[in-house]
Amino acid sequence: MSSSHTINIQALLENHRAQAYSNIAAYTLLIEAKACGTQLYDHFLNLGEEIDHIWSTPWNAGKILYYATKYPAFLDGAFLLYCTTPSTCELLYKLAGGMKYPS
């Protein structure tokens, strides 16, 4: 096989790989958007009970743990929806990971 055919095959493979990564990114974004929508729906569905049982109580360990586990998830989802380029994704995943596992 000549080198021109090899170059054409390599270019086609790279193009196919880029298209596959683009499709994966699009599906990932769609899944993340659906997860954020479900999370918002759940938040508003249970907001009345949260106001009655959490907001009206004095600060204690349970209330702190509740807020520490519920609301950072909204930030995590919002960060990941803005993942549009590989460098942005890397930065946002590091930030999201840093919110979950402080070093």
Image: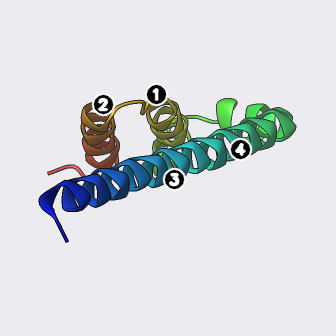
Q: Position of residue 25 (x, y in %)?
A: 49, 46
Q: Position of residue 95 (x, y in %)?
A: 28, 38
Q: For the residues labelled 1 and 2, say whether their Cβ atoms are less than 8 Å apart.
A: yes
Mark nearer the N terminus (2 vs 3)? 3
Left or right position of 51 against 6: right
Mark 4–mark 3 Cα distance, whole angstroms, equals 15 Å
Q: For the residues labelled 2 and 4, say whether their Cβ atoms are less than 8 Å apart.
A: no
Estimate how packed mark 3 is, as few (under 14), some (14 to 19) or many (20 or more) residues with alpha carbons within 10 Å: few
Q: Amino acid at mark 2?
A: Thr
Left or right position of 82 against 92: right
Q: Nearer the viewer, residue 4 or 57?
A: 4
Q: Amino acid at mark 1?
A: Tyr
Estimate how packed mark 1 is, as few (under 14), some (14 to 19) or many (20 or more) residues with alpha carbons within 10 Å: few
- Dot 1 falls on a residue whose secondary structure is loop
Q: Which residue is mark 3?
A: 24
Mark 4–mark 1 Cα distance, whole angstroms, equals 14 Å
Q: Position of residue 89 (x, y in %)?
A: 33, 38
Residue that appears at 80% across and 38% down: 41
Left or right position of 30 against 44: left
Q: Amino acid at mark 3?
A: Ile
Q: Which of the 4 image quarters holds residue 91?
A: top left
Q: Which residue is mark 2?
A: 88
Residue 23: which disc? none
Q: Nearer the viewer, residue 62 or 31?
A: 31
Which mark is in front, 4 or 3?
3
Residue that appears at 73% across and 35% down: 40
Q: Which residue is mark 1?
A: 82
Residue 34: which disc? 4
Residue that appears at 57% across and 41% down: 29
Residue that appears at 16% across and 64% down: 2
- Dot 2 falls on a residue whose secondary structure is helix
